[in-house]
Image (cartoon, grey):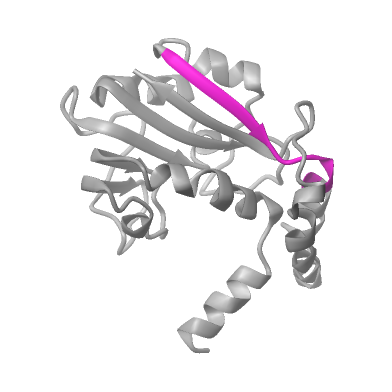
């Protein structure tokens, strides 16, 4: 299948969760500058998402052609105050010790540096390779309590959650339900549920 056809199918059969991240987070990534570190980059092309970065270092625990090096979020191989921003998209749930990883982020950030993170709340268990936990807004506030500021915003509502659960991690035909993701993320159905969100966006400042 041609690359452009794969892209069309990927955009058609997309989760509500991913649509909301693209709308809420990607524009914020585009505004980041200086030296930027991506933790858990996977196969995503962050070089297109962070065009303003002076340098962009992509890391993960598994090899990928998109990576600059393999690194463990719990013990980052960088000196103190090496970066102006850290990005973690759907990474916190896969960390065995997120408190240690957050301390590492603070260590390698310069004064005024920013962590941009996204964490799922109501989403199916997905190993990458393992899935350890889900955070509430209060849990994320504790996780980033040593930062000078931590802005935590829920996104998604019960409709988004239900569709994503039905269309992920199950039988292949259920994927077809994702075509309704575009409908459920139109403005009339785009309210946010504080007690039943899809996930959270975190912006923490050192």
The x and y percentages for residue 34 are 22, 38
Question: Could you tell me which quadrant the C terminus lies in?
Answer: top left
- Whether residue 59 sits left or right of residue 127 in the image: it is left
Q: Is residue 97 visible?
A: no
Q: Is residue 113 above or below residue 129?
A: above
Tell whether position 152 is magenta: yes
Front residue of this view, candidates 180 and 135: 180
Question: How many marks can you see?
Answer: 0
Find the magenta span and give its range.
Answer: 149-161
The x and y percentages for residue 2 are 49, 88
State which quadrant residue 154 falls in. Answer: top right
Front residue of this view, candidates 124 and 153: 153
Q: Is residue 176 visible?
A: yes
Tell whether position 20 is magenta: no
Q: Is residue 36 above or below residue 1?
A: above
Q: Residue furthest front?
A: 187
Q: Is residue 87 above or below residue 171?
A: above
The x and y percentages for residue 196 are 79, 32
Q: Residue at x 45, y 19 (%)?
A: 99
Q: Residue at x 27, y 48 (%)?
A: 52
- Whether residue 20 sits left or right of residue 60 in the image: it is right
Q: Residue at x 81, y 48 (%)?
A: 189
State which quadrant residue 141 falls in. Answer: top right
The x and y percentages for residue 42 are 41, 54
State which quadrant residue 198 falls in. Answer: top right
């Amino acid at each position: 299948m041609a690359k452009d056809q794969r892209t069309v199918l990927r955009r058609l059969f997309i989760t509500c969760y991913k649509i909301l991240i693209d709308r809420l987070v990607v524009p914020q990534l585009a505004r980041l500058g200086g030296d930027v570190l991506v933790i858990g980059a996977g196969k995503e092309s962050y070089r297109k998402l962070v065009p303003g970065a002076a340098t962009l270092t992509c890391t993960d625990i598994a090899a990928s052609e998109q990576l600059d090096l393999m690194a463990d979020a719990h013990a980052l191989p960088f000196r103190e105050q090496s970066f102006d921003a850290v990005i973690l998209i759907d990474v916190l749930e896969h960390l065995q010790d997120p408190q240690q990883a957050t301390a590492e982020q603070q260590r390698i950030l310069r004064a005024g540096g920013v962590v941009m993170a996204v964490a799922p709340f109501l989403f199916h268990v997905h190993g990458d390779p393992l899935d350890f936990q889900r955070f509430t807004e209060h849990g994320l506030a504790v996780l980033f309590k040593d930062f000078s500021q931590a802005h935590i915003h829920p996104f998604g509502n019960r409709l988004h959650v239900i569709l994503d659960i039905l269309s992920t991690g199950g039988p292949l035909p259920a994927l077809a339900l994702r075509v309704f993701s575009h409908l459920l993320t139109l403005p009339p159905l785009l309210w946010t549920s504080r007690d039943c969100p899809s996930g959270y966006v975190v912006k923490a400042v050192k």
